[in-house]
Amino acid sequence: SCLVALAARSRAAFVQDPAQLCPRGQMPPEWHPRCLSGHLLYGRPDEVDARLMPEVGNGHVARKVKGPDIFAAGLYNGDAKGSTGESSHRARLPPYNVWVKFDEGSAQERTDAEGGWGYALDVERAVFMERSHDPMEARGVQVDQTWYAPLHEPTLLVHEIRLWNRAGEERRVRLEQWGAAESPAFDMGLAPRERLLAHGLSPSDTHAVQGGTRVGEVGNRTSVALAANRAPDFVRLRAGGRATLYALTVVVTSLNSTDPTGDALETLGRYTSGGSAAMASAFGAHADAWRRRSEEGRVEVEGDLALAQVVNASLYYIRSSIREDWPHGLSPGGLASNGYSGHSFWDMETWMSPPLLMLEPATARSVLRYRFDRRERAREKARACGSPLQSYCPPGYQQRVAPGALMFPWESAHTGADVQYWGGKLGPWGRYEQHISGDIALAARQYWYVTRDREWLRDIGLPLANGTASFYVARVEWRADTDAFDYKQVMGPDEYSWPVDNSGYTNAVAQIALRFAVEAAAELGHRGHAYDDFKYKADGLRVPEWPGAPPGHPELTGGYHPEYQGFPKDPQRPRAKQADAILLAYPLGAVDAGKMVANDLEFYEPITDPTGPAMTWSMFAIGWLSVGNYERSVPHFRKGFHNAQPPFGVWTEYPAGAKNFPGCVNFITGAGGFLQSLLFGTSGMRIRADGLHFDPAPPSAAGTAATRLTLHSLHYL
């Protein structure tokens, strides 16, 4: 591992007052030091948009705090082709909620309350906290609540309630609770009484449901069990008295158990028996596990508290949605939402995996394991491409494609089958947006370059490389009487334009896939005609270049990279949805930073939709940093985290004020793009075959108040 520090010589004009972020007079005093460290984000309950509440998760189960749903990684409902409407999507589990009863409109957040009040998300310890006062008919009682998903206990969710009677006489605190025994996503009902008794659990004190998803993705229904303990209806507290209650929820599925109900009840019983004695050490073990995770790799920010909080929250939200031992992918909306149906897209490899690769490579390996474990569906898709109701492939493709070719779908869920369908029809993204297989190959290549794990390369990397290269070598079309090849009828990252020929981005990732297969095979001692063909077609596939000025910009001499052959379709009104051609330099490394890349940035910046997805602006920041234009990098770096909404840094797909705000929430794709602008933008770090290369920009190039950025414990070899 290594440590890279960038020390500042000047301070930017933009500074956010720590006194506003960490108001000493409002927040509990014990929260204040952690808030100033950047690890705790504070908010007033009356100022928090319910849509922007944060989540707690451990990569196996997750939920938005106080939200109506629990989600489990790999648990989906609906068939792949969406025969009845929506295709396979995250299955919503109804939680068993317990809450302290307050009067309607009561002043539970009194500004004069001794001990402080409010909400807080501690991202280093992965816990959400709330302090309030004066429950119904119990004035003088302080209520502290915490929510967390123990990292060391993957199936468990914890809601801890601590009561302290600060009044001079006895108080009675009322609790309310509710849980459903049914859900639109499941055929389910109450677990048999006999099963509860067999695990030493009282049926009157336990809420347990069991069942299975209504519709399997490809016929494979998943069984599930949820078990929770019921709370008492009220708690009596003598003057000065304290009490602690635990509302526990356990979720087990047939993905990791042959007896979900039995295992859920066993885990619940283990933590509730003996007066919940096992819970005494649960939070400590959880916090220690997350602290070790932070020590594994992190970004430290000094001098800019607001930036530090966004950085730490962004990394927390990605990490809380994935774990190294449960390879079920990452979705744009994270594990705690059904955003984008919980599907995995190119977002996983292109936007979220790069920060994980450098800070926590075991979870980056989990990303690639997700694809590897679902390669049979990718193999089926490669064979079917060009058939009716399938992705587009040209005539002759099916005669050329090898049996082992892998064509990964634009959207996948549990099985790896294409789930971009709606009502049995495949949308244009699923038909034409075929760069995802190359995105996966790039992620595999970068993992190999960083780890040099030959066993992984042999068992996982080379099969992925061979499969994706075999798809592309059959998909491209020979241009008659030349040594050139075309990739026709595709959609690049700019989803406003389709179908197009020779998308620069698509051609570039296809080249990467073809060349990585050759490179990986040579490393492992493999040779053959297939690899010669991969190299020949990679060399013959071109990334479009135009030697003249881009449309409407005669001053930009030296050429530029059109998004695709014939770009733009409307010369009078060129437009782009999001970063596309500017990705050729980073992250693809397909072109060198220089005059042409500077022209790309200059040309595409004003024609890119200003309300487009969040990660676009981080890529512009990296681009301007790479060509040394630090005046232009500043607004884009800052805009890159504009969609991290206060007070908890929850990411929205679109910025506040946009007509489509908020879009997908919590949009961790944007978090991943922003973290890349720190890890790879400010440091100039690039992952290449011969090592890590650095070309750091001056700290002022980011336009923040940070006096020091430290990339702590980068993993390399």
Image (cartoon, rainbow, N blue to C red):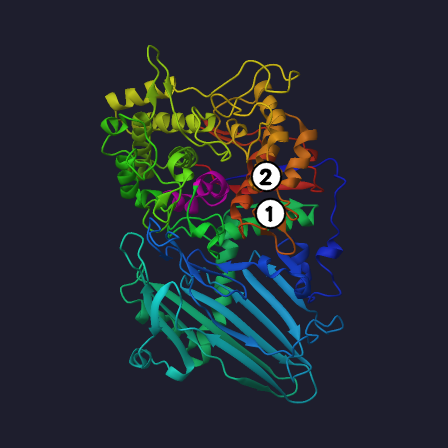
* Residue 191 placement: quadrant: bottom left
Q: Quadrant of the C terminus?
A: top left
Residue 484 as seen in the image, left or right of residue 356: left
- Give the residue pinned by disc 2: 678
In the image, is residue 362 part of the stretch drawn in magenta? yes
Q: Position of residue 47 (x, y in %)?
A: 68, 62
Indicate whether 555 appears above or below 701: above
- Residue in the foreground of this view, choosing between 455 and 673: 673
- Residue in the foreground of this view, choosing between 622 and 52: 52
Q: Which residues are magenta?
A: 346-368
Q: Amino acid at mark 2?
A: Leu
* Residue 552 placement: quadrant: top right
In the image, is residue 249 part of the stretch drawn in magenta? no
Q: Amino acid at mark 1?
A: Val
For the residue carrying disc 2, how many other residues have a C-alpha within 10 Å: few (<14), some (14-19), or many (20+)? many
How far separated are the C-alphas under marks 1 and 2?
Answer: 9 Å
Q: Position of residue 467 (x, y in %)?
A: 30, 33
Whether residue 388 appears in this view of the structure is yes
Indicate whether 597 appears above or below 37: above
Q: Earlier in the sequence, mark 1 or mark 2?
A: 1
Count the marks: how many? 2
Q: Position of residue 477 (x, y in %)?
A: 33, 21
Magenta stretch mostly in which secondary structure?
helix
Indicate whether 689 appears above or below 201: above
For the residue carrying disc 1, how many other residues have a C-alpha within 10 Å: few (<14), some (14-19), or many (20+)? many
Secondary structure under the numbered disc 1 in the rendered image? helix
Q: Using the image, tell me which numbered label, if any, was put on residue 311.
A: 1
Q: Position of residue 642 (x, y in %)?
A: 64, 45
Residue 424 as seen in the image, left or right of residue 547: left
- Residue in the foreground of this view, choosing between 104 and 137: 104
Residue occupying the point 63% across, 25% down? 602
Look at the numbered discs 1 and 2 and tell me whether their residues touch, using CB distance below 8 Å.
yes
